[in-house]
Each structure stands twice: as structure tokens, then as C-alpha cells.
Image (cartoon, helix red, strand yellow):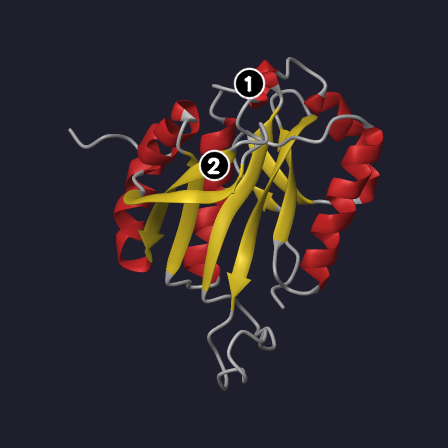
Amino acid sequence: MPALVTLSGRSVRLEPLSLAVVDDLVAAASEDRSTYAFTRVPQGRDEMVSYVEAAMAEQAEGRTMPFAIRWLDTDRLVGATRLMNLEYWQGPMPWPPGVRGAVGDVPSVADIGYTWLAASAQGTGVNRESKYLMLSLAFETWNVHRITLKADVRNERSRAAIGALGAHFDGVRRAESRGADDTVRDTAFYSILRAEWPAVRERLELRLGLVEAAA
């Protein structure tokens, strides 16, 4: 299984999710919740404990790597995110079809998802830098073939943020899951391939102010 890591950037630090940060996450999730119409975010301490415990159980199986998001400008935890749906293509094919194979040292493909931010951290660049840190880990340390990102098709804000990363729009899967508002959700899928990462990285580093634009 991939080793647990802390990912540090200029204004964001992604720390391994644990029960020790439950109260901080409850405080973050208790800010203005009107922006969570299309995102399922735990409400209250009991829901947050269940949320963290479920993520840690998947982490123990090597299927996800969940993080708490610390905004260094304020030294507060302001949300959570994760690399998830980790698939391992090394070794023999599992048999029979549909059986989960043993996990490997590093994933071959992954999703980025379950991202939510406190209202005060939205629109600040925290989300963008968080994605940059996870993409860098996935492509440069794990050497994955693909990262998938997805959003409720109605969530124009999240879709715009994913598109701004430089991700390729793959299409809409109709009736893909249950929505956060208990409707049947159509989901927009996006992806970034290993060959596309250098261009995506350059674009992100420019937007994050990590490099200067060419004259």
C-alpha cells in the first residue's frame, strides 16, 4: 500500500485524516452550509466521526488516501479531500472477474474526490493548491496512468474548477449515483492522463504563482 504522507505547499498542507482532527473538521463544516447543495458534507460530530472512520477503513485496505486540509495562512483545518478508488494493475489478474485483487506498492490509476471546504476557504486558492499537491504525488511519485475527477452535472462551480485545472471532459454518465439532495444524480467525468500532466502542471504552477509567465 502507498505510504501515508503529508503534502506541503505554499499556503496549504494536506495532513493524513485521523480522528484527532474531528472537532476541527466539525467547526469547518459548521460554517455557511448553503454551498453544499451538491456535496455531501458531514454535519455534527457523530456524522464526522463516522465519515473519518469510514475513510480510515478504506485507507487500511489501500483503496483511498484521505487528507485534512490545513490552510497555512490561518493555521486552521478548513476541509478534507482524498485520493480514492485506487486501482493496482501490477501482478496477476484477479480471478474470478469482479474479485478485488491484492493491492500493490503504488496505484496505477486514482480519483480525486470527496473534497469539501469551509465557506471561508472557498474561492481562496486552497482548493487549487490542494489539487496540485495530490496530482503531483500521483503523477510524479506513483507514476499513475490517469487521474479521474467528477462532479454532479448541476454543480457548475465544481465543474468550472475542474475545467480550470486543465482536465479533459470525458462526458456525462446519466443516473450515475444518488445525489447529495437525494435525487438521482447525473455525473460529469473528467480525466488527466500521464502524458498530459506536464502541461497541466505548468498551467497550475503559473496560476499558483510558483513560476513566472514567459515574456
- In this view of the protein, which residue sits in the foreground, 133 or 83? 83
Q: Secondary structure at mark 2?
A: strand
Q: Which residue is mark 2?
A: 185
Number of other residues with Cα within 10 Å of mark 1, as a class: few under 14, some 14 to 19, many 20 or more: some
Name the image quarter holding residue 189.
top left
Lateral position of residue 155 relative to residue 183, left or right: left
Question: Residue placed at 47% from the left, 25% from the top?
Answer: 125
Viewer can see residue 119: yes
Percent x, y of residue 214: 19, 32
Question: Residue placed at 28% from the left, 31% from the top?
Answer: 212
Q: Indicate the amino acid at tag 1.
A: Thr
Name the image quarter holding residue 58.
bottom right
- In this view of the protein, which residue sits in the foreground, 180 or 78? 180
- In this view of the protein, which residue sits in the foreground, 71 or 178? 178
Query: Vertical placement of 139 versus 52: above or below?
Result: below
Name the image quarter holding residue 152.
top left
Viewer can see residue 21: no
Query: Vertical placement of 136 versus 63: above or below?
Result: above
Query: Vertical placement of 63 versus 187: above or below?
Result: below
Number of other residues with Cα within 10 Å of mark 2, as a class: few under 14, some 14 to 19, many 20 or more: many
Q: Secondary structure at mark 1?
A: helix
Q: Quadrant of the N terminus?
A: bottom right
Q: Which residue is mark 1?
A: 35
Q: Gap between marks 1 and 2, in whole Å?
A: 17 Å
Question: Residue placed at 61% from the left, 61% from the top?
Answer: 63
Q: Earlier in the sequence, mark 1 or mark 2?
A: 1
Lateral position of residue 93 relative to residue 82, left or right: left
Q: Indicate the amino acid at tag 2.
A: Arg
Query: Vertical placement of 206 versus 195: above or below?
Result: above
